[in-house]
């Protein structure tokens, strides 16, 4: 969430472009939650504790990750062109 808020602030000119290196670091940390979900699913299936089903949350999470990735790429392109202040 912090990465998305920081990107939104940069796009709205409420935060300086100097914030982008921090956003890149946050982007790398954002992948930690994907890794943890994979570990949880593997543990739950391996130990046979319960049944793991994919529901609407998986699709919502996937959409959020893809939108965040798209916004980050767009921000990088705008920053290179000098369109962001």
Image (tube, helix red, strand yellow):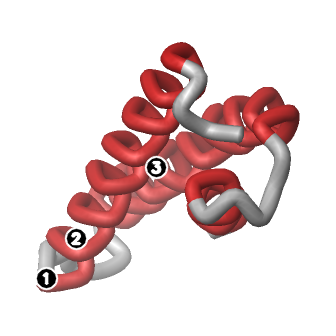
Residue plotted at (28% across, 49% down): 66
Badge 1: residue crowd in 10 Å (few <14, some 14–19, many ≥20):
few
Image quadrant holding the N terminus, namely bottom right
Q: Secondary structure at mark 1?
A: loop
Residue 12 lies, in percent from the top left, at 61, 64
Q: Describe residue 6's horizontal placement relative to residue 73 as left or right.
A: right
Q: Earlier in the sequence, mark 3 or mark 1?
A: 3
Residues at badges 1 and 2 in contact (C-beta under 8 Å)? yes
- Give the numbered dot on residue 18: none
Task: Please tell me which residue lies in front, 40 or 67.
Answer: 67
Residue 26 lies, in percent from the top left, at 72, 43
Position of 10 relative to 60 (above/below)? above
Q: Secondary structure at mark 2?
A: helix
Image quadrant holding the C terminus, namely top right
Position of 34 relative to 58 (above/below)? above
Could you give the CA–CA distance between mark 3 and mark 1, rounded to whole angstroms? 16 Å
Q: Earlier in the sequence, mark 2 or mark 3?
A: 3
Residues at badges 3 and 1 in contact (C-beta under 8 Å)? no
Q: Secondary structure at mark 3?
A: helix
Q: Describe residue 15's horizontal placement relative to residue 41 as left or right.
A: right
Badge 3: residue crowd in 10 Å (few <14, some 14–19, many ≥20):
few
Q: Which residue is mark 1?
A: 55
Residue 52 lies, in percent from the top left, at 21, 74
Q: Which residue is mark 3?
A: 34
Position of 65 relative to 2 (above/below)? above
Could you give the CA–CA distance between mark 1 and mark 2, rounded to whole angstroms? 6 Å
Residue plotted at (82% across, 37% down): 22
Residue pushed farthest top?
Answer: 80
The answer to whether residue 12 of the structure is visible from this angle is yes
Could you give the CA–CA distance between mark 2 and mark 3, rounded to whole angstroms? 11 Å
Residue plotted at (14% across, 84% down): 56
Q: Which residue is mark 2?
A: 58
């Amino acid at each position: 969430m912090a990465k998305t808020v920081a990107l939104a602030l940069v796009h709205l000119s409420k935060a300086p472009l100097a914030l982008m290196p921090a956003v890149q670091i946050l982007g790398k940390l954002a992948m930690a939650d994907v890794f943890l979900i994979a570990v949880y699913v593997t543990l739950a299936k391996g130990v046979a504790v319960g049944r793991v089903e994919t529901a609407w949350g998986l699709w919502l999470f996937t959409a959020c990750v893809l939108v965040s990735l798209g916004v980050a790429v767009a921000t990088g392109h705008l920053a290179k062109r000098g369109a962001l202040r």
